[in-house]
Amino acid sequence: MKYLAIILLLFAIVLNEAHAQITQGFTVKAIVVDGDTILMENLPQIIIKDRRTFKSKRHAVRYNRLVRNVKKVYPYSQLAASLLRKYNDTLMATTDKREQRKIMKQAEKELWDRYGDELKKMTVSQGLILIKLIDRETGSTSYELVQELRGRFTAFIFQGLARLFHLNLKASYNDDGEDQRIEDIVLLIEQGDI
């Protein structure tokens, strides 16, 4: 019985080794340079950064708060960009101004019903980050989007209301300047590190 178990074990190992050598093929890109074939593969972009050090505990707390705020509002900025593309396609299909206004009112009602409670709970700093990230995702400031979709007067009123809360719908996203920390956090979120 002992020998039978050993033989079965060896037989299983041999079958496993034979199975491991059967692989499925795949296609790779290659170029030929001076008679040598060089394989080409596009690698995903990664970000390599030093471990963050802070001057004080207060700076660390501020950075962690910024990370938390960006993680909260980043999905909304992506949603805004995708919905804007969807509604722009719908609006381009119709030339009647009355029909376009009707579509926009319906879209606004749907969005407000679905996301209104969550957006009301955002803090002022989260609102500022959302305004900047919408500019990053769409390429247009929030003021320009409101002006395009709802008209100049509505954009003027919304800008006035935003200014009451120390926000600016005309704020643009500058990934090299003042918004560098936000850009770093967004890239880390996209990479899956945070």
Image: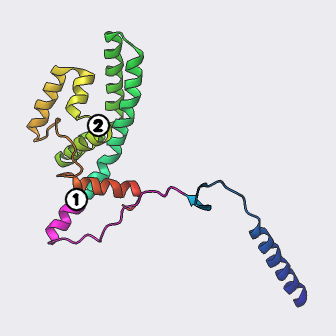
Numbered mark located on residue 139 in the image: 2
The residue shown at (46%, 57%) is: 44
Q: Are marks 2 and 1 in contact (CB under 8 Å)?
A: no
Left/right placement of residue 1 relative to residue 99 reads right
Residue 93 in the magenta stretch? The answer is no
Q: Mainly helix, strand or loop, the magenta region?
A: loop
Q: Note whether 170 is above or below 39 in the view shown.
A: above
- The spot of residue 142 in percent (x, y) is 23, 34
Three-letter amino acid code of the residue under disc 1: Arg
The front one of 44 and 100 is 44
Quarter in which the N terminus is drawn: bottom right
- The residue beneath circle 1 is 65
The residue shown at (31%, 20%) is: 105
The residue shown at (40%, 14%) is: 94
The residue shown at (37%, 19%) is: 91
Three-letter amino acid code of the residue under disc 2: Gly
Left/right placement of residue 110 relative to residue 14 reads left
Q: SS of the residue at dot 1?
A: helix
Report the Cα–Cα distance between label 2 and label 1: 26 Å
Residue 133, quarter of picture: top left
Looking at this view, name the residue that lies furthest to the bottom: 2
The front one of 13 and 33 is 33
Residue 185, quarter of picture: bottom left
Query: Mark 2 against mark 1, which lies toward the viewer?
Result: 2
The front one of 67 and 113 is 67
- The spot of residue 20 in percent (x, y) is 74, 69
Work out whether mark 2 precedes mark 1 in sequence or the reverse, and give the earlier one. 1
Q: Which residues are magenta?
A: 41-64
- The spot of residue 141 in percent (x, y) is 22, 35
Circle 1: is it few (<14), some (14-19), or many (20+) Cα within 10 Å? few
